[in-house]
Amino acid sequence: MTNGITQHYLATVDHRSTGEAIRKAVDSPLLSTGYGGAFLNRPLFLEHAQQEGLGRDLSALFRLLTTLPDRVADGDLGRYCELVGMTRSQTDAVRRTAGADPVPLGRADLYHDGDGFRLLEFNLSSALGGFENAEINRALLDVPAVADFTQRERLRYADTLGEIVRVMLDSARAPWWGDRPFVAIVDTPGSFAGLEGRLGFMARLLADHGVDAVACHTGQLKEEGGRLFADGRPVDIVYRFFIIEDLLEEQGEIDLIDPILRCHEAGGVTVFAPLDTEMYGNKRALALLGEEQVRATLSDGDRELVDRFVPWTRRLRRGQVEVAGDHVDLESYCLDNQASLVLKPSLLHGGAGVATGWSMSPAQWREALDDAFRSPFVVQRRVAPAPEPFPDRGETASQVLNWGVFMAGDHYAGSVVRGVGDPDVSVVSMGAGARVGCCFHREDESGAV
């Protein structure tokens, strides 16, 4: 997706000296805590129309996803949660935190296939990796060539964390006791061990947004009189970094999370974001949008959005499924079209459990398919990302990119971009050796000055 801004950057910037300057600019303890020192050697760019279009599409898709319980389960959250593969304990947590209006916050993972962006998944939650991406933008603006280019091109960047804070404060139900809200950024003990530094970094960044915060795990919170306490202070908002899969019985986290849910129900604290967000961000929710009985209820505009933006995705289950207007046996279709399909667990994150047909032998694919039929999975048509050029040290390498685009409220709220050199990689992720970059976008429709 080499747009006009990117072409101008590639043609006018001295990549040898600028690449070295970028490497030095991002070599900081704070960014290393978040990303481990693996960074792309240039920024990414969105034209104004692309940035505005992504905001519109994600906002419209969010609205559409939140109508699914009414469309497929007559508004019964229990039935809907069962359809998307949630367990009884997960459904209970959804019911206990669900508000009248779903919180509009998420990060979409997208590929650009050369013609447009295609959605891989839509993570609707507060537990979103990449929240600190604007710190990369700020570091790159210390590089003179980047700063000059962004000024000439009238480029800016979105402060993702600032947008998250705005949504968080707008959605808070419980009033805070002091002049500034006190937020506990909470994960489970097992996950917190690896994220403590990063969540502590987040707590420090929140101070610049008028919020006092501490990072902790569920076992460090104390419940007293219908309120939660962290570091001896009453908590106003629990910023939730624990996720719906932590509420599986075998994870052993339910007893530690239950006091948080009790205090939320009693009005003593606000859980942000409520767990109902995850039933809309579930991969099976995307699959439901493509099913015939749901499509029949959509407006022409909503069908156009789904067809253009969401690759063919279906719940993995035995029986017939619609493909390009025909009805075929899903298992046979998966076996016959292995190279163009990917299997994804409905609720896991970070690429866990994903099986890509193009990277497996027929026997491995058959085994993965058999296993997936026994669990809540979806099957999705492969999106092949178009590579982008990254000149460096006299040579040009190609990278395929996963665009992590944030939505906050009803608009675009920044991007964190991950890139790898292997176009056939199963998942473009940090675990696969991806490097991370930031994105600038043009603030209006005018060209460079």
Image (cartoon, grey):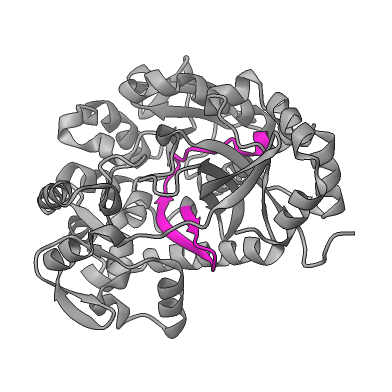
Front in this rendered view, residue 389 or 273: 389
Check the image and report above or below for 177 versus 87: above
Seen in the image, is 172 located left or right of residue 297? Answer: right
Seen in the image, is 71 located left or right of residue 201? Answer: left
Instruction: Check the picture and name the quadrant holding the N terminus.
Output: bottom right
Measuring from the top left, give residue 388's x and y in whole percent: 59, 52
Q: Residue furthest right?
A: 449
Measuring from the top left, give residue 65's x and y in whole percent: 38, 64
Instruction: Check the picture and name the quadrant holding the C terminus.
Output: bottom right
Measuring from the top left, give residue 30's x and y in whole percent: 61, 22
Look at 46% across and 20% down and name the residue there.
196
Check the image and report above or below for 192 versus 376: above
Seen in the image, is 2 located left or right of residue 275? Answer: right
Q: Residue furthest top?
A: 232
Magenta residue span: 109-136
Look at 67% across and 67% down and name the residue there.
49
Measuring from the top left, give residue 164's x and y in whole percent: 56, 44
Check the image and report above or below for 233 versus 127: above
Front in this rendered view, residue 280 or 130: 130
